[in-house]
Image: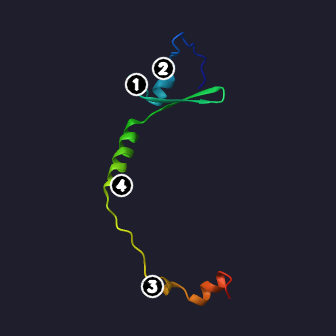
Amino acid sequence: MEYVVRIDKQGRMVIPASIRVSLGIVDGCKALVRLDGWGLIVEVVDEDLESCVAEWREMALSLHAEPFAEDVEESWRWMSREYAERKLGFR
């Protein structure tokens, strides 16, 4: 879809109804506006997504995970030391 719209002296423009319906734009919804060269990009902000990301962030920051590591000898269980040294060019 492509439309030509007028911009008033306060910088406002009306987004055509068919585009608003397609994007689910309703009164009070938020949009991200950015400049791209000589173009203007307007993206609808999905507030449900924003709230989910904020919730996940809080949950991740509240976790107190302990770092862990295998013992060196335990990690060699899956391959021989000789094989690893050959692959790395030490033999």
Q: Which residue is mark 3?
A: 74
Query: Mark 4 and 3 residues: CB-CB less than 8 Å, in contact?
Result: no
Mark 4 or mark 3: which comes first in sequence? 4
Q: Which residue is mark 1?
A: 26
Query: In the image, is 55 to the left or to the right of 25?
Result: left
Q: Position of residue 20 (x, y in %)?
A: 47, 24
Q: Quadrant of the C terminus?
A: bottom right
Single out the mark in the foreground, 2 or 4.
4
Task: Identify the residue at horizontal 39%, vertical 45% (top origin).
Answer: 53
Task: Name the amino acid type tagged 4.
Answer: Ala
Q: Which residue is mark 4?
A: 60
Single out the mark in the foreground, 4 or 1.
4
Task: Identify the residue at horizontal 66%, vertical 30% (top origin).
Answer: 37
Q: CA distance from mark 4 to mark 1?
A: 32 Å
What secondary structure is found at the residue carrying circle 4? helix
Task: Name the amino acid type tagged 1.
Answer: Val
Q: CA distance from mark 1 to mark 3?
A: 58 Å
For residue 88, above or below residue 58: below
Q: CA distance from mark 4 to mark 3?
A: 30 Å
Query: Mark 2 and 1 residues: CB-CB less than 8 Å, in contact?
Result: no
Task: Identify the residue at horizontal 61%, vertical 23% (top origin).
Answer: 2
Q: Quadrant of the N terminus?
A: top right
Query: Label 3 neighbourhood size at 10 Å, few (<14), some (14-19), many (20+)?
Result: few
Q: CA distance from mark 3 to mark 2?
A: 64 Å
Q: Which residue is mark 2?
A: 17
